[in-house]
Amino acid sequence: MLTDYHVHLRPDEPGTDAERYFTAANAQRYREAAEERGIAELGVSEHVHRFRQALDVWRHPFWEDNAVDDLDAYCAFVREETDLRLGIEADWVAGREDRMASLLEDYDWDYVVGSVHFLRDAAVDHRDYDVWSAARSADDVWRRYFETLGHAAASGMFDVLAHPDLVKVWGAESPRPEGDLRRFYELAMEGIDATRPAIEVSTAGLRKPVDEIYPDPAFLRWCLECGCPVALSSDAHVPEHLGYEYDRALELLGELGVTELAVFERRQRRLEPLA
């Protein structure tokens, strides 16, 4: 079995409103693309910041600019008009944990994808709110990122930990610490070991400046050793990106001895043989 759970039915660009993309016809485009690529388990996990209800959690300017859709309508659409698994990509926002947990508990998800995009008010992957512009050093950003990732994992709020080393997204365009990066990965491991969420192996990084799969093989190996299963995803925002470069991801998983993938239904996880 192959999966793709970290999928968005619309691009991130402005003007990609729900009325145009949350349609049965658009969902069918994704389903057909998945079938062509041998992906049996397909789910959608829209960004939480695109929904008005998220402003009860955090009122960051980026969220205020994007929170225009209704979360109830999204959930009803996926459940009633598609055969996709229902997910959400929810940010870890330090200091807003209880509010995010309350929001998530109000809905009947199949799974929740947890992401770290922001360190306080600055983003690791958005140039308009760039953490690097005021960073003291690459070491400082990486340390803060992986400490935050560990807190997110330890919360138990998320079924899948998304693109776990997203901090590397800019590749050579932003500084990277020198030396063995495992000293940063280690900062997240206590939290990961405490709850053992599924670790997303994401090919999205192959479409980014870093041109690498998330996460680094050394980091992934540690997660596997502490008992975390793998969730395979592409972070697609258009049907053409479903299953993107999965051959490279499958090669990596084979080298690490991974033979099963995590599958979710109503927030219950099971493991299925990897095709």
Image (cartoon, helix red, strand yellow):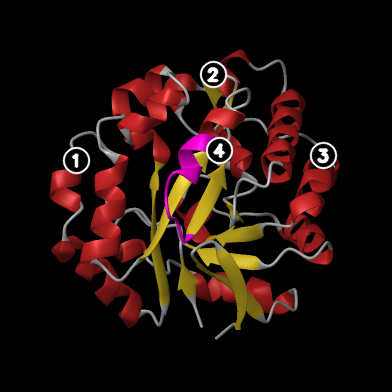
Checking the image for residue 17, the label placed there is 1
Residue in the foreground of this view, choosing between 93 and 199: 93
Query: From this viewpoint, is residue 217 visible?
Result: yes
- From this view, report whether residue 202 is shown above or below residue 91: below
Which residues are the magenta region?
102-110
Residue in the foreground of this view, choosing between 216 and 266: 266
Residue in the foreground of this view, choosing between 82 and 129: 82
Q: CA distance from mark 3 to mark 2?
A: 21 Å
Residue furthest toward the front?
A: 106
Determine contact: label 4, label 3, CB under 8 Å.
no
Tell me, yes or no, whether the highlighted magenta stretch contains residue 109: yes
x, y percent for residue 275: 55, 86
Neighbour class for label 1 at 10 Å: few (<14), some, many (≥20)?
Answer: some
Instruction: Name which residue lies at 51% across and 60% down.
Output: 203
Q: Amino acid at mark 1?
A: Asp
Snapshot quadrant of residue 172: top right
x, y percent for residue 82: 25, 67
Checking the image for residue 101, the label placed there is 4
- From this view, report whether residue 160 is shown above or below residue 190: below
Checking the image for residue 187, the label placed there is 3
Mark 4: secondary structure: helix
